[in-house]
Amino acid sequence: MSRAKTNPRPSLAGRRILLGVTGGIAAYKSADLVRRLKEVGADVQVIMTAGAQQFVTPRTFAAVSGRPVREDLWDAKAEAAMGHIELARWGDAIVIAPASADFIARLTQGRADELLTTLCLASKNPLFVAPAMNQQMWASKATQSNLKTLRKRGVNLLGVGVGGQACGDVGPGRMMEPLQIREALVAHFQQGPLSGVKAVVTAGPTREPLDPVRVLTNRSSGKMGFAVAEALTALGAQVTLIAGPVVLSTPPGLRRIDVETAAQMHKAALAEAKDAALFVGAAAVADYRPAKAARAKIKKHTATLSLAMERTRDILADVRASRPKLFMVGFAAETENLARNARGKLANKKLDMVAANLVGNGRAFDHDDNELHVYWKSGGRSLGKDSKANLARSLAELIAKRYRG
């Protein structure tokens, strides 16, 4: 029996946020900001300046983010592989909160004398700055001129708030509250290439009952399908995730339907596809099931056991038959002849795209990484070997490009 779970919270699912913390008393709020970003699905990497560490310890941010804090441009271990460039490429956005008057001045000058300013120069992704300073520093001509310059460069300025300050003054200069910063980021990313597009994703295995105790299933963990659902949500899609029996938490911002058998997944998929614009079949659905499940536990009376099996309904084929113009993406897990089998599935199921990977012999199953090759009628692309989360992001971006194209 299926059951639906809806997560109505604002979503930053799959988004990677570089959070820069500079020197100022408002740095204590940034620990709460990390928590607020993570609770809606963001992955947060904190970078602290030396000044920030005079107010809050790196250990605090490591605890709330689940990641070691980056502090030093000259970290020998991190920079052995040009870590600051790697970080700049990793994030979907850079958020500086709090941004002190000094940091804003150095950012305006294009300085790169420590890790955080260097990251800002090395990244092409959106930059959000949440100023925090004394009201007189905020009002100064130098600060206002710097802010005007940053606006012209396309920097997103967040705030400031007006009220009492740690120094005793009252006026503008307070850092925007963590929830307000989160709302600004959510609003920004909701303008993604799949904004408003209803998408259905199937993920995980199915289980077919043999008797009241035993089931026939497969080794799919559902991680790849869940990652794809999260990545599509991050691009603005309204995602319904139909999940087989897995032990995975629901990514924020999407609706989840839990099923167990192939028949249940088939029913849910056809129902959800009726008004969808995009369908991604990442589930490992059973091709066969026992023709008749035993009503009592099968006892081991004989040396061998023969099972009568019957075909399950083909979800992709039936969804295509009901929705001839639906943009559909399938998955092909193969043990040999990857390209030939994947292209065969592409043609036979009348899919728009198919993502294929080799499985078995230590590949894909029970691992957090994978290697994907994507095919469509007129071409294809290798996404290489990477974590399933990274591959899902690359696949989602390719799906969005071809869907919009």
Image (cartoon, grey):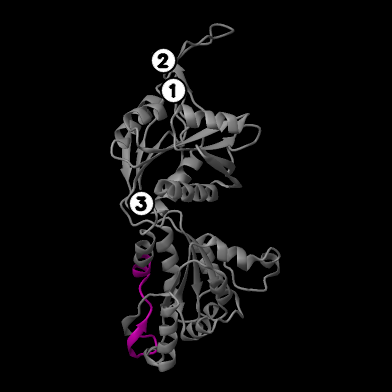
- Toward the front, the furthest residue is 378
Mark 1, residue position: 208
The answer to whether the residues at label 2 and label 1 have Cβ atoms under 8 Å apart is yes
Is residue 259 shown left or right of residue 219? left
Q: Is residue 308 visible?
A: yes
Separation (CA) of disc 2 from disc 1: 9 Å
How far, Cα to Cα, is label 2 from label 3?
A: 37 Å
Q: Amino acid at mark 1?
A: Glu
Rendered image quadrant of residue 245: top left
Nearest to the observer: residue 125 or residue 10: 125
Give the x, y percent position of residue 313.
39, 22
The residue under label 2 is 293
Q: Position of residue 274 (x, y in %)?
A: 29, 35
Which quadrant of the figure contains the N terminus? top left
* Left or right placement of residue 208 versus residue 8 in this view: right
Q: Amino acid at mark 2?
A: Ala
Which of marks 3 and 1 precedes in the sequence?
A: 1
In x, y percent, where is residue 151? Answer: 41, 79
Precedes in sequence: disc 2 or disc 3:
3
Q: How far across and down, in percent of the image, does residue 14 sit? A: 46, 54
Range drawn in magenta: 165-182
In terms of secondary structure, where does tag 2 sit? loop
Label 3 crowd (10 A; few <14 / some 14-19 / many >=20): many
**What label does residue 253 carry, if any?**
3
Q: Is residue 178 magenta?
A: yes
Q: Residues within 10 Å of mark 2 (few under 14, many from 20)?
A: some
